Image (cartoon, rainbow, N blue to C red):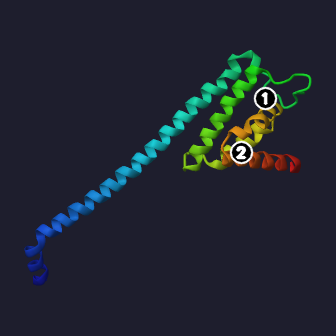
Amino acid sequence: MSSLTAWLSDNWVSLFQTLGICGSLLFTAESLRLDVEAKRVSEYLTLNTQHRRLWGQLHHRSRLANLLNADRNLDLHPVTTEERLFLELAFVHFHTGWLVARKGSLVPVSVLAADAGHFFRLPVPRAVWTQVRATHQPEFVSFVEEAVRQMSELSRKG
């Protein structure tokens, strides 16, 4: 016990500095973790706001009312310019969501894939997507096509 007391009396400053440095590092690590979590929540809220603003247009613009009709016959009711422009914005929104989800956002990629699978299978979105997919990042195109494929398989089984 006296050797410990002797060591402490000779090295108390170094021990105190070491404990202070370790405490500072732990505090910094926790602060960074909390900051990353806050940024994720902020990204989620921003994406959610954009989502509501975009999809709210379907309720406020009567010419978009038939856009999500799964039974729409495109030969009788072709895609309008207004629908195409809206869908191009929706595709960018999906792309942004996919980019954020890949980085570990609060929304998992699997949830986004299910949503994309439902959406891109609809006649109007599918028709416009077929025309514009070459303008999108190849990895995103693969993501959408795989989501549609999986959703089609689930529909056939169910």
Q: Which residue is mark 2?
A: 141
Foreground: disc 2 or disc 1: 2
**In the rendered image, which quarter is residue 9 located in?**
bottom left
Quadrant of the frame with the N terminus: bottom left
Label 2 SS: helix
Label 1 SS: loop
Mark closer to the chain start, 2 or 1: 1
**Residue at position x 73%, y 20% from top?**
82
Relative side of 37 to 82, left or right: left
Q: Is residue 58 above or below residue 105?
A: above
Q: Which residue is mark 1?
A: 68
Q: Which mark is residue 78?
A: none
Relative side of 47 to 9, left or right: right
Relative side of 27 to 116, left or right: left
**Residue at position x 73%, y 40% from top?**
134
Task: Tell me where residue 29 appears, x and y as whole percent.
Answer: 35, 56
Please rate how many residues cluster around mark 2, counting C-alpha atoms within 10 Å: few if below 14, some from 14 to 19, many from 20. Answer: some
Please rate how many residues cluster around mark 1, counting C-alpha atoms within 10 Å: few if below 14, some from 14 to 19, many from 20. Answer: some
Q: Is residue 143 above or below residue 82?
A: below
